[in-house]
Amino acid sequence: MSSKKRSAFLRILLSGIFIMFTGVVMAAIPKNVLVIGQSHSNMKTMDPHVCYESPTGSFVMNLYTQLVHISYENDKFVIEPDTATSWNVAADGKTWTFNIRKGMRFANGDPLTAEDVVYSLKRVIKLKKSPSWLLTDTFGLSEEGIKMIDSYTVQIVTNGAPENVVLSNLANQVGSIVNKKLVEANDKDGDMGMDWLVDHSAGAGAYVLKAWNRNQAMIYTANKNYWKGPARLETIIFKDVPEAAERYLLLKKGDIDVAFKLTPEQLAEISKGNMARVVKTPGQSNEYVGMSANFGPFKNPKVRQAVKYAIDYNAMIDKVRGGYAINNQQFIAAGYFGYKENNPYSQDLAKARQLLKEAGYADGFDVELTTSVTERRRAEAVIVQQNLAQIGIRAKINIMQTAQMYAKFRKQGIDLIVAGWGNDYPDADALANPFANHRVKQLAWRLNWLDDKAADMAEAAAQEKDSARRAKIYQDLTNYWHENGPFAMLYQMVETWGVNNKVKGADDAFGGAYVHFDFYKLYK
């Protein structure tokens, strides 16, 4: 379908949707409707305890409330009350008590009580789907450790994990509170409503899932019973627009209000106009070069440091991301607990060559550089290849299908890789483990960096209750990791959206933990 025909089709579709819900013929996108253009390829289910895809999970959060909420303020993540008005942890550091907000109602009018909270948390554990580990593994939640004290008090028992680890994971969509009565009414062969919740909602959040026509559109409507009051935008339409070029054109024409995942070139063009703007926020992922500590030259930390000094980080950010990235060379993301700017590397070819000479590789060496088929990764690999050639390291690029590459990587079968890592929750613990603790058998293990000192520090920080001491451990670990680790962190992503200038509040509503979209904050 041509761009012109698709634009016309979109207007017809939106008109039909608007008439369906309002009875009014729509000449343009109404003031109380938001239309988002994005690919639906990663949208599988709206069940908050099953969904683990991005950005779908952050859409789902608008359908539900969680015990607590995370906002992003003054470049830091802040925990705020939501379903729980207050909470405390006992002297044992393990027993948490949450006081549930009185008077809350689900979208269908049913009261929300502690019984729904207990049911929801236990449901996560019973279903054992992808996101359940955020409760069971990160802070040791079990069915036995969840109980209702009274109608408005819930108690959970953890493994003693730090406060920020517990609360930030409860704030994820996996911590969403579902309507026990409604979910049980839609149980199918003991699935706890899982099949029904694929395309229905049973929450008390700002919005309700009204309809989902696969490969066309998903519709949210405002929840009149939301505890903060109804949202100003009555309808959110998620239009399936797979191609960035088409999303860009639709945004320029005013046929959509928000365009996801535009190219740096498209974002630059938007910035020149007066109809739309670029909204950006620190992303929850990073790009890295990984070196196997089991591969000849990379066994020597000096060679690994030489690679880090060979890379032109500024060129990487400018050429690959058009400037939409953060020069963050550590594993802790900006804004996370434990983050303190620490970027010791910049391109210094003379120093890189000297380190290679001291390690016995003055003439360089040959190595295979593996990456995936995505345009971004291929561009990153070319820059890395060019940078390494300047110090005598001859890297031959091997492009693999993403699934095949990670299958090989998980078997410790790659010597040099360009890849990325998405963050699971906004705490240093979420990153210290994969990048520094080989015992969890994630990135450090895949690169054969079996360093017990780094692993010990990661584990000690994960159990430290005193925030100041915990932050100091992460700083020490970061310094040790910089000097000894097998990673050259290329940059931290910056997430971007093209947004029509009529849409207000997007700078506060888009971003934060899990790149959350708080549609309640939006208006026109």
Image (cartoon, grey):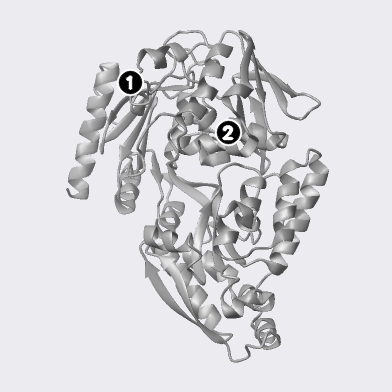
Which quarter of the picture shows residue 435? bottom right
Dot 2 alpha-carbon crowd within 10 angstroms: few under 14, some 14 to 19, many 20 or more: many
Label disc, if present, on residue 220 of the rendered structure: none
In this orientation, does residue 285 appear?
A: yes
Indicate whether 465 appears above or below 452.
above
In the image, taking residue 367 as reference, residue 12 lies left or right, namely left
Q: Position of residue 353 (x, y in %)?
A: 65, 86
Indicate whether 211 appears above or below 275.
above
| Gap between marks 1 and 2 measured at Cα | 25 Å
Which quarter of the picture shows residue 343? bottom right
Q: Position of residue 356 (x, y in %)?
A: 65, 84
Relative to the observer, which residue lies in front, 220 or 172?
172
Indicate which disc, 1 or 2, sits on the residue closer to the N terminus. 2
Residue that carries the numbered disc 2 in the rendered image: 135
Dot 1 alpha-carbon crowd within 10 angstroms: few under 14, some 14 to 19, many 20 or more: few
In this orientation, does residue 65 appear?
A: no
Indicate whether 376 appears above or below 234.
below
Identify the residue shown where x is 60% and y is 60%.
444
Which quarter of the picture shows residue 56? top left
Element at label 1: loop
Q: Quadrant of the C terminus?
A: top left
Relative to the observer, which residue lies in front, 98 or 135?
135
- Count of number-bearing discs: 2
In the image, taking residue 360 as reference, residue 24 lies left or right, namely left
Residue that carries the numbered disc 1 in the rendered image: 189
Element at label 2: helix
Identify the residue shown where x is 46% and y is 30%.
49
